Amino acid sequence: MKKSLSWREFIITRLIQSSGYSAILFVALIFFFLLREGLPTLGEVDTSSLLNIRWYPIENYFGLLPLLTGSLIVTLGAALIAIPFGIGTAVYISEIAPRWVREILKPLVELLGGLPSVVLGFLGILVLAPFLRVFLDLPTGLTAFTGSLLLGGIAVPTVVSVAEDALDSVPRAYREGAWALGATRWQTIWRVTLPAARSGVLTAVMLGVGRAIGETMTVMMVTGNAPVLATKLGSLFSPVRTMTATIAAEMGEVANGSTHYHVLFFIGMVLFIISLVVNIIASSVVFRAKKRAERILS
Amino acid sequence: MKRAFTFFLLLSFIITSCGSTSSRAVSESSAQYIENKGSDTIVNLALAWAETYQGDRPTVRISVTGGGSGTGIAALINNTVDIANASRRIKQEEIDEARKNGIEPVEFIIARDAIAVIVNPKNPVNELTLKQISDIYSGRITNWQDVGGEDRPIVKLSRETNSGTHVYFLETVLRLGSREDKTLFSMDTLLLPSSEGIISEVRDNPNAIGYDGLGYVPQDLKTIGIAKKQGGEYVLPSIETVNDKSYAVARDLYMYTNGEPSGVVKEYLDWILSDEAQLIVAELGFVPVK
């Protein structure tokens, strides 16, 4: 009896363990695949032409800078919208809203997160882009800013959902302590609750940014896809071409094994590395914050 | 194990014999399959043809797939299709490669396709020369004022680079048909992933200029008259102007077979050039060859 129990336990432990390790395995396999398909680029195209400002693959112009800056500027814009808006909503839901409002708002926000991005893209093309063109008097409404607004909308539910969970898990005693010391509601939120939930809120922000930089469909539909180098803040209001849209638009018809094919995988590799770096920075910040918190508490 | 094997053998025997009694009449004469593959521009037309043709002749089966002109020609070279569709002429290298495989590509012009240049109806510009369109798309002209319009910036719209229409437009309009010319699309040209994207932006934006196959252009957009040279006659795209070659931006659409076709493939190609099939061409917005 006892023996069979330990035996069963052994199997279950191993199963859980292997499913845990499988995530690492899959990431490693995907990265290996990207390397295998993307690295030949470095042998086929000079580094200097990869740093060119012209992307026109059918004539062998493989400048990646316009795509890189395009992705960065759209993501930056989306983050500037999603972070304050998302954290604000999370604070309202968790700290201020009465119970019944919270019970309506939270599922609604999560429903928003489930909207297919292609639907948002249609909204963008038919409503948002024409409106922005007239409202801001731009030559065209298909700009990085349009993409940022929609991506911000896509990232907000992620940010709200994770940040709200983090705020919710801050012990009630913290708030009561602050109130007892005479802090106002705002002082409590800004000085006590938010800092206490810092690591969760930071995770929320990173997940939101990750969602934004990886989003493809919406961006491809509304940013105009013109591979122009985005150098200044004004580029936010002109068309850009992102890395994800480039891969999605061109992968379908590219000849397997050609230089263009390898360059597209190389772009995928760059995207992978960017999100890896974002994640590493986020977790190291969280780690450091935790350590300091432990020091203070002990 | 052995018994199971016998059982399956028996079962499959029964099934095949049952099948053959009911469908013998068809299956004997319907060994007539036509594999048709290639250009995405032509795929809708090829499908419409295949459906009509099969409707009248139940013994013929035509399978139509897209994938692009290059894909179709590659399949012809590897001898895996009977007919390859292409929206561009076969290249000399491709002919050489085919001959190496013992394939002799034979060309048929099956329809024509005009590319219309479109602007918003609010835009007062009605006519442009080829050179002006080239200058607009290459970024040398950036304001509608310079081509007789209002003081507005020009927003250039194009299909994505993998579209055959994009390449055709680059060669015929931007480079004015010259092989040495290395003009490229201006970097701020918007590359939209679909015809629909171009049309909805032109419909909405008075600054925009776009191009698309004549068959895809809706009535509420303005089609630009194009002159081949400065001082030449401005011509709107239509079946007549494409066939008498006065409209400059039109191309032939091709089908290629291995050697002179015979049997069922020949019958099909003859039918494609008949009046009945060419009527379908006009219905889909392409230009009939006759």
Image (tube, rainbow, N blue to C red):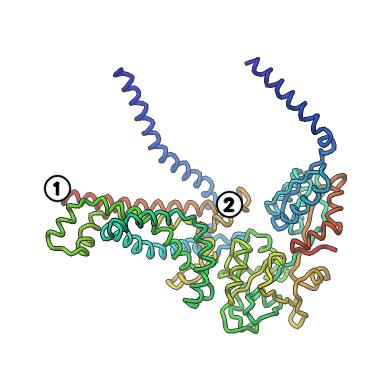
Q: Residue furthest left?
A: A181
In the figure, A206 relative to A127: above or below?
Answer: above
| In the image: residue B109, left or right of residue A200 | right
Coordinates of residue A279 in the picture (x, y in percent) = 36, 51
Q: Are marks 2 and 1 in contact (CB under 8 Å)?
A: no
Question: Which residue is the site of mark 1?
Answer: A298
Pinpoint the chain carrying mark 2: A
Q: To which residue does mark 2 refer?
A: A261
Residue A287 horizontal side relative to residue B213, left or right:
left
Question: Which of the pair B193/A231 is nearer the observer?
Answer: B193
Residue at screen point 28% across, 56% down: A99
Secondary structure category for the residue under label 1: loop
> Residue B201: percent from the left, percent from the top?
58, 70
- The answer to which of A202 and B32 lies nearer the viewer is B32
Which one is nearer the viewer's eye here, B105 or B192?
B192
Q: Quadrant of the N terminus of chain A?
A: top left
Q: Residues within 10 Å of mark 1 (few under 14, many from 20)?
A: few
Q: Name above or below for residue A190 compared with residue B186.
A: above
Mark 2: few/some/many CA within 10 Å (<14, 14-19, 20+):
many
Residue A152 rendering spot, x and y as whole percentages: 42, 62
From this viewpoint, is residue A193 visible?
Answer: yes
Location of residue A7 by image quarter:
top left
> Where residue B286 appears, x then y in whole percent?
76, 63
Q: Amino acid at mark 1?
A: Ser
* Left or right relative to A258: residue B265: right
- First in sequence: mark 2 or mark 1? 2
| Number of numbered discs visible in the structure rendering | 2
Q: Could you tell me if residue A53 is visible in this image?
A: no
Side of B74 relative to A91 (left or right): right
